[in-house]
Image: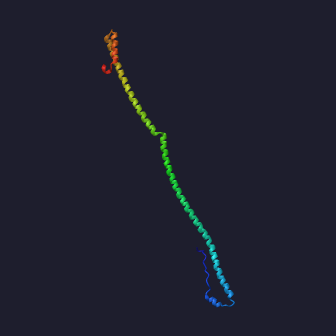
Amino acid sequence: MEDEPQIILPTAPPPEQTAEAGPSASAPETTAKEAAPEQAPSLSMQNMMKELEPLEVQMAELKDAKEKLAQLEENYDKSKQHVAERTREIRTLEKKIKELEKELTMDKAIADIKKILWSKIGQSITDQWQSIETIHEQMDLLSRAQAENQRARASLGSMPEIANRMINVLNNRTGLQLA
C-alpha cells in the first residue's frame, strides 16, 4: 500500500498567473501550460487503472479461493458425517456377525443337546440301576430258593415226586412270601 500512486487532480491555474500573462503572444504558451497539467492527470489515472487491474485480479482470485475453501469445508463436513455413519453401520454389522457366528457354532443348541443327553443318560442309569437292584433281589431269592430246595430234598429224602412239587411252589413264591 506504500507504493500506491498518488492521485493528482487537475486544477485550474491560479488567477494571478492568467492576469500576469495577459492576452499577448504568450497565449500559445498558456495553452501549452494548460495542456501539460491536463495530460499529467490523465496519465496518472491511466497508471492508477493499470495498477488497479492486478489488484482486481488478485481480489477475484481471493474471492474464488474463499469460495473453493468454503466448498471444501462443506465437503469435508459431509465426508466426516458419512464416515461416522459408515462407522456406526460397521459396528452394527460386526455385532450381527458375532451373533450369527454364535448361532453357526450352535453353542446354544449344543448346550441344549448336552443337557437333554445327560438327563436321558441319568434317567437310563436310574432305570438300569433299578434293573440291577431287581437282578440282585432275584439272585438273593434264587439263592434262598436253592437253599430251601436243598433243605426240602434233604428232609424228603427218598420222595422225589414231592420234591419236584415243592420246588415248583418255591419257584412261584416271592421273596416276601418265603421270608
Residue 47 in the image: x percent, y percent?
64, 75
**Extreme residue in the front direction:** 23
Total numbered labels: 0
Image height check: is 157 above or below 105? above
What residue is shown at x 62% (from left), y 71% (from top)?
53
Image height check: is 67 above or below 117? below
What residue is shown at x 48% (from left), y 44% (from top)?
98
What residue is shown at x 59% (from left), y 67% (from top)?
60
Image height check: is 86 above or below 175? below
Position of the C terminus, as image quadrant, is: top left
Residue 4 in the image: x percent, y percent?
60, 75
Q: Is residue 91 left or right of residue 176?
A: right
Image height check: is 173 above or below 21? above
**Extreme residue in the top direction:** 158
> Splitting the image into 4 quarters, where does residue 124 fall?
top left
> Splitting the image into 4 quarters, where does residue 57 fall?
bottom right
Residue 146 in the image: x percent, y percent?
35, 16
Residue 105 in the image: x percent, y percent?
48, 40
Q: Is residue 165 left or right of residue 115?
A: left
Position of the N terminus, as image quadrant, is: bottom right
What residue is shown at x 60% (from left), y 68% (from top)?
58
Q: How is the image coloured?
A: rainbow
| In-front residue for pair 156/69 | 69
> Splitting the image into 4 quarters, where does residue 108 fall?
top left
